[in-house]
Amino acid sequence: MMHRTLASIAAACCAVGLLRPMPAVAQQPQQGYITTSDSARLFYKIAGRPGPGVDTIIAIHGGPGLDLESIYNDFASGLGRKHVVIFYDQRGGGKSELPTDTSRLVAARQIQDLDEVRQHFGLTKVTLVAHSYGPLLAASYAIAHPDAVTKMVFFGPVPPRRGDFFTRYGQNLNARLDSAQRAALAELGGIMTSDSASEDAIRAACRKFWAIGLRPRLASPNAMRVVKSDLCATDPGGIRYGMRTANGVIMSSYGDWDLRPSLRALDVPLLVVHGQQETIPMDLTEEWVTSMPHARLVKVPNAAHFTYAEQPVLVWSVVERFLASK
């Protein structure tokens, strides 16, 4: 288990090697729906071109209750030139199923959905690249299906245990907002979750919400344009349901989570990329590395929650070297 600087990781990792092609992916349309074993429909998009030596990655967005568009443009740009990247809207967000029966949203079902995405594309083993909440789902999946995961990359992850995470994260986030901004977020959130709001009103409120909400999540609050992904591009119904229902139900279903005992036996290489100005406390993030036998932490200067957008040249270089290493 190692803590390394960005430069030392870049220097230490191996040169790019030849990776196994995944022909089953080549036969799939670039976007569409997967029907799960319980008849839910999950929306997916694919970036990159399959071919000899090109591996396949499943990208896992954050939230919960967000959607693939929240990471698509940045990940497709950063990874799509050398890999096939499968994105999907998790159940409860975006264009995927928004169930009336919320028992269909729980963590166990999210883990099963991820496995069914992997199987749908004919992948025996796969690399998982996840952001924010996504690493909690990815790690839970790897614990349940260790033989199906080659490697994992976590950007700005929630910690492997709940503990006092929400309290400390909330304090850090609120400290970067003034009272007017907090009031505006509450008002805009009300519009985004309202049954009476039109689709146009939800989307407009979403854009105003994230124009404020991105600020405390970036090292430079005025540099919002560095994030190329669109957090408001999906269906307004998915935005409303994700914020009003899915986020709370899914997060609550993890309970007082603590993955650390199971992580100690997980023989899967992990790269954690965390901004030095991140609102998710660094010491909690470090617990991913101290809990796993093959984990590395990269602390990215002048970056917060969107390291891959704030410092793309440095971050994607490190990620590529990690993915190519043996």
Image: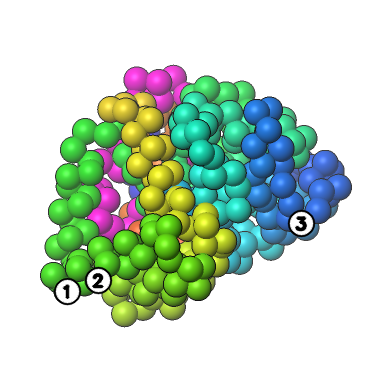
Magenta span: 260-287
Check disc 3 and report the residue beneath it: 30
Is 172 located above or below residue 138 in the figure? Answer: below
Q: Identify the residue shown where x is 51% and y is 68%.
A: 199
Query: Is residue 176 highlighted in magenta?
Result: no
The residue shown at (27%, 34%) is: 162
Q: Closer to the camera: disc 3 or disc 2?
A: 2
Tag 3: amino acid: Gln
Badge 3: how crowded within 10 Å, few (<14), some, or many (20+)?
some
Q: Where does the image place residue 223, in percent across and percent down from the top left?
A: 36, 78
Identify the residue position indicated by label 2 in the image: 184
Q: Is residue 308 above or below residue 50?
A: below
Which is more toward the observer, 91 or 226? 91
Instruction: Judge from the rendering whether residue 44 lies leftward or rightward of residue 295; answer left or right.
Output: right
Percent coordinates x, y for residue 215 in the rendering: 30, 70
- Residue 170: x and y in percent read 20, 52
The C terminus lies in which quarter of the figure? top right
Side of 64 where 71 appears, left or right: right
The amino acid type found where label 2 is placed reads Ala
Return the residue nearer the eye: 192 or 194. 194
